Structure formats: structure tokens, C-alpha cells
């Protein structure tokens, strides 16, 4: 199977790009952040303290996270319920970053992610795909952008969905999330040695997509 691993910080454009590359190349798109988000959503719904590692891990071990594809779109199922509509809030995002530092939480999803990539040609995005989940991926990309650019993108996304939020709050959240995702003990966000570094601050979606497609061709994909 051919594997494309895209890692990078929050708001770098990973999901937009990964989805587009997958669609254009006939691959499936696996959004690993959404899997972590589903578990965070369940913790929030059940009132589990995100700072309590044991409680979070025990709770997550009772959950079933699975994926379904509808018209090529990934749907995350939490105990069989499609939770796609509930996992994109800032609250869920921040809780996700907090609980994804725990070993038990990460191990829970590792098998699912590797199995998916063993069964299908996949574009998988996250924080530790090139460094940990799919270390043998044929193409690895570290996609980033300046904090200001990423905050602006998140802000525009929220506004487009009719949600509230201020640029200051979003920028602060992004800095906090970067700090936690990059400095955690287990599988922190960092560029894999063999990953191509792409800063999308001044690149269009099409330019980034074309660059990744050219990396795929260089790596032998027809
Ligand atoms: O990509 P995202 O914003 O949906 O990810 C939400 C959080 O999930 C992110 O802050 C850290 C965590 N995450 C992770 O630890 N490992 C991954 N492979 C994907 C996401």
C-alpha cells in the first residue's frame, strides 16, 4: 500500500490539503485528529476530568472508535454514533490536545490507524504519523504556517460556521496547543528526518497539493 503521512501543528491546513490530495489521487483520507477528538468528546459528555490520566484512560478504554466512509468523506463513529458534527469546536479541540498526551489514549488508536494504512492507499494526517504511526510511509510531509496565519484561518473557519471567537483567544489557544503537542513525552509533534518541510503561509491550497502530488510521483506513484 502507498502511504502519505502529513504532520503539522493546528491550523496548518493539513486536513484541507490531505483531503484534496486523497480525492485527486484516489486514496482514502484518514484524519487521526478526528479519532482523538471523538474520545475527547466522550470525556466532555461524561464529565471526565481531562487532567486525571487514570480516569481518562479508563474511560477511553470503554469506548469503540471506528470509521466509515460516505462519498469519500471520513465519518468517525463513537460507540456506533456518527459524531462528525460535534467534534470541531474549540472546546473539543483543546480537550483533545490535553488527553492525547496520555499513553493509554494513544495506544488505543495506534492499531486502528496502522490497520487502515495496511488495507488502503492512504493520506493520513496528524501529529505523529511520519515519526511514529507510519514510519515507513513513502511520502512524509511536515506542513506548517506562521502562528498568525494559522489563527486567521481558524478564525475564518469559525466565522463561516457562524460561531463566536476572538483572534486573541484563538491565537492564544494555538500557542498553547503547539506547546503541548510539541513537548509531550509520548509521540510529540516534530518533523520526521525524512519529511519534506512545507510552510504554507504564502502558498495556495493548489500549490501545496501539487507539491505533494509531485513528491508522490517522485516516490514511484504513477
Ligand atoms: O488535527 P486536530 O486539530 O484535529 O488534532 C486535535 C488534537 O489531537 C491535537 O491538538 C493533538 C491531538 N492529535 C495527536 O496527538 N496525534 C495525532 N496523530 C492527531 C491529533
Image: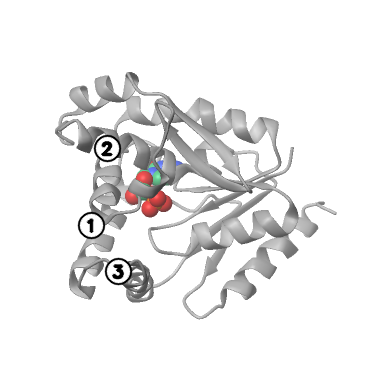
Residue 182 position, x and y percent, is 34, 50
Q: Residue at x 67, y 31 (%)?
A: 118
- Of the pair 47 and 18, the residue shown nearer to us: 47
Is residue 168 visible to the viewer in this orientation of the structure? Answer: yes
* Callout 3: SS: loop
Label 3 or label 1, whichever comes before in sequence order: 3
Q: Does 17 sit left or right of 160 as displayed?
A: right
Q: Which residue is mark 2?
A: 99
In this view, 222 is above or below 122? below
> Alpha carbon of mark 3 to alpha carbon of mark 1: how far?
24 Å
Label 3 or label 2, whichever comes before in sequence order: 2
Q: Does 64 sit left or right of 167 as displayed?
A: right
Q: Which residue is mark 3?
A: 162
Quarter of the view holding residue 18: bottom right
Q: Residue at x 38, y 75 (%)?
A: 149
> Alpha carbon of mark 3 to alpha carbon of mark 2: how far?
27 Å
Quarter of the view holding residue 51: top left
Nearest-to-viewer mark from 3 and 1: 3
> Alpha carbon of mark 2 to alpha carbon of mark 1: how far?
14 Å
Q: Residues within 10 Å of mark 1 (few under 14, many from 20)?
A: some
Q: Which residue is mark 1?
A: 176
Task: Locate the N terminus by quadrant.
Answer: top right
Does the beta carbon of the residue at mark 3 sit less than 8 Å from ligand 1? Answer: no
Q: Residue at x 74, y 64 (%)?
A: 214
Residue 82 position, x and y percent, is 43, 38
Number of numbered tags placed on the structure image: 3
Amino acid at each position: 500500500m502507498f502511504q502519505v503521512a502529513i504532520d503539522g501543528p493546528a491550523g496548518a491546513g493539513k486536513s484541507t490539503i490531505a483531503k484534496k490530495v486523497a480525492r485527486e489521487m484516489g486514496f482514502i483520507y484518514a484524519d487521526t485528529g478526528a479519532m482523538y477528538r471523538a474520545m475527547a468528546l466522550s470525556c466532555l459528555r461524561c464529565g471526565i476530568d481531562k487532567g486525571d490520566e487514570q480516569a481518562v484512560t479508563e474511560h477511553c478504554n470503554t469506548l469503540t472508535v471506528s470509521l466509515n466512509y460516505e462519498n469519500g468523506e471520513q465519518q468517525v463513529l463513537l460507540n456506533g454514533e456518527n459524531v462528525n458534527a460535534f467534534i470541531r469546536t474549540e472546546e473539543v479541540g483543546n480537550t483533545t490536545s490535553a488527553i492525547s498526551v496520555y499513553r493509554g489514549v494513544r495506544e488505543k488508536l495506534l492499531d486502528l490507524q496502522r490497520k487502515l494504512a495496511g488495507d488502503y492507499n492512504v493520506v493520513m494526517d496528524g501529529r505523529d504519523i511520519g515519526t511514529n504511526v507510519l514510519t515507513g510511509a513513502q511520502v512524509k510531509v511536515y506542513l506548517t504556517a506562521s502562528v498568525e496565519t494559522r489563527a486567521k484561518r481558524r478564525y475564518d473557519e469559525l466565522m463561516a460556521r457562524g460561531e463566536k471567537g476572538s483572534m486573541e483567544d484563538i491565537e492564544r489557544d494555538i500557542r498553547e496547543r503547539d506547546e503541548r503537542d510539541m513537548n509531550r513525552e509520548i509521540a510529540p509533534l516534530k518533523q520526521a528526518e525524512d519529511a519534506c518541510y512545507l510552510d504554507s503561509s504564502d502558498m495556495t491550497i493548489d500549490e501545496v497539493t501539487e507539491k505533494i502530488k509531485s513528491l508522490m510521483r517522485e516516490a514511484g506513484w504513477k
